[in-house]
Amino acid sequence: MKIRGTCQNCGRDFFVRQVLDSGGHCPNCGKPFQTHYTAVLTEALEQAEAGGSALEGALEKLAGMEPNFVLDEETVVARIRAHLEEIRTDARVRADRAAEAAAR
C-alpha cells in the first residue's frame, strides 16, 4: 500500500516512502514534519504503510477464497477513519494558529 499525504507547509503531495527516504522531512520543501520526534514519526509511518499492505494483502487473499461470509466494513475501517480524522483536525488547528500568528 502506498500512503499519500499533503505537506501543511508547502501544500504539495508526497508518498510515505519519500518521507522515509528524506528522514522525516517533506521531500518537496525539506521542512521536518515533526521537529521533536522525527524518529518516532518515521517509525510510525513505516509501520502504517507495512500494516496497510498486510491488511490489504490479507483481505485480497480472503476475497480470492470466495468465503461464505461477509466482513463488517466498519469493524475494519472505523478506527482507521477516526485516527485519520484526528490527524486532519490537528493539522487544521496548527494551520489556523499559524494564520492567526501571521495576521498579528
Image (tube, grey):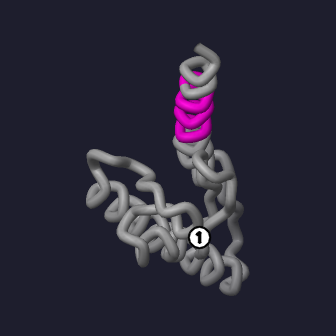
Question: Quick one: 58 or 86, which is closer to the camera?
Answer: 86
The residue under the point 61% across, 83% down is: 61
Tag 1: amino acid: Phe
| Residue 47 located left or right of residue 19 | left
The residue under the point 62% across, 44% down is: 81
Q: Is residue 64 above or below residue 44?
A: below
The residue under the point 72% across, 81% down is: 66
| Residue 20 located left or right of residue 11 | left
Question: Quick one: 18 or 97, which is closer to the camera?
Answer: 97
| Residue 21 located left or right of residue 101 | left
Residue at the front extreme, as displayed: 104
- Quadrant containing the N terminus is bottom right
Residue 95 located within the stretch drawn in magenta? yes
Q: Quadrant of residue 40?
A: bottom left
Q: Main secondary structure of the magenta part?
A: helix
Task: Give the percent coordinates (x, y) of residue 41.
Answer: 35, 56
Q: Is residue 68 above or below residue 76?
A: below
Residue 96 located within the stretch drawn in magenta? yes
Question: Quick one: 30 or 76, which is closer to the camera?
Answer: 30
Pointer 1 local density, CA inside 10 Å: few below 14, some 14–19, many at least 20 = some
* Mark 1, residue position: 15
Residue at the top extreme, as displayed: 104
Task: Give the percent coordinates (x, y) of residue 10.
Answer: 63, 52
- Quadrant containing the C terminus is top right
Numbered disc total: 1
- Extent of the magenta region: 86-97
The residue under the point 60% across, 31% down is: 95
Task: Give the percent coordinates (x, y) of residue 77.
Answer: 62, 51
